[in-house]
Image: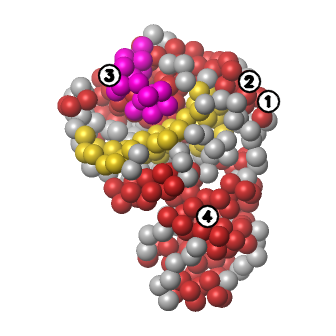
Amino acid sequence: MKSILNKLINKKTLSAKEAENVLVDITNGKYNNYQLVSFLTVFLMRQLTVDEFKGFREALLKQSLQVDLGDYETIDLVGTGGDGKDTFNISTLSSFVVAGAGYKVTKHGNYASSSVSGSSNVLEYLGYKFTNNQDVLKQQLEDANIAFLHAPLFHPALKNVAPVRKELGLKTIFNLLGPVVNPSRPKHQLLGVYSKEIGELYSDLLKDIDVNYNIVHSIDGYDEISLTSNFDLFTAGEYTEVTPEEIGFERAQQSELFGGDTVEKAGAIFKNIINGKGTKAQNNAVIANSAYAIKTISGKTLNESIDLAKDSLFNGKAKRSLELVTQH
């Protein structure tokens, strides 16, 4: 670690292989907490390079519990978190809308780190039983078009760094890695990010590892399409700024997207929306994100994708996917 730290302190960057090797050593507990904090601090002061990001990602994936769902064409809908907006579970709801529309979703998620209710919190509340059993996950994809991969069951190596991350109390490289270490390695991804700069980094990474993607960031800070402002859209190495109006939606108020201050309230909001009883602002946010995910995996036009998302949400198809997957 000493040579790595000297290199980083002298403002040099790591190759993908160096990054991979050092992260393997870190997660295997090779270094003491002081060395680990010093290492993580470097990346609090500067942005990762694509090579470093690629190497760190590969290290975590190689150490994860392997799950082969390659027989299916799947998409993951995930946000970085960290936007501080306390919205309802938009990406998780959108995942069920996409599944209800007939597309396979392998959603990777965890308990909340910066909000009241993450995807794992709300799904656990709704009765989903976390599993890393590959046969069960395959059956869920067959029956409900969706399988949920609860991160702690697939990334045991992260236990070694958890205490230091908790004591440090700051966003580290591990927060950035969460959205790109889905152990099923889906070929498609809709990724929400909390800043335009982070969107550019993810875009460079996903392009480099040959993932078909759309990355979104609402300009007023949301790590999803909130419809409360224009949003950044990164796709296939291209960038555009999109207004809610040009894709057919009214602007929402931030207060309309609040997700509740307990897991129970978040779960109640989730059930209300998936039952077709959400407010216009809630429904529109879910439909917009779902549509971009459908567009990503299907290649359909945005208008076609919006129609499919509305059909799934309002005709009970998304709800049916939730019912089927919580029966397993």
Asked if the residue at tag 3 contacts the one at tag 1, i.e. Cβ–Cβ closer than 8 Å, the answer is no
Please tell me in which quadrant of the rendered image residue 245 appears: top left
Residue 135 numbered tag: 1
Three-letter code, disc 2: Gln
Three-letter code, disc 1: Asp
Which residue carries the number 4 mark?
56
Asked if the residue at tag 1 contacts the one at tag 4, i.e. Cβ–Cβ closer than 8 Å, the answer is no
Dominant secondary-structure state across the stretch colored magenta: helix
Residue depicted at x 79% and y 35% = 133
Residue depicted at x 52% and y 78% = 13
Please provide the residue range marked out in magenta: 292-311
Q: CA distance from mark 2 to mark 1?
A: 6 Å
Marked residue nearer the N-terminal end (4 or 1):
4
Residue 197 left/right relative to 159: left
Q: Secondary structure at mark 3?
A: helix
Residue 187 visible (yes or no): yes
Whether residue 114 is situated above or below residue 253 in the rendered picture: below
Three-letter code, disc 4: Phe
Asked if the residue at tag 1 contacts the one at tag 2, i.e. Cβ–Cβ closer than 8 Å, the answer is yes
Q: Secondary structure at mark 2?
A: helix
Asked if the residue at tag 3 contacts the one at tag 2, i.e. Cβ–Cβ closer than 8 Å, the answer is no
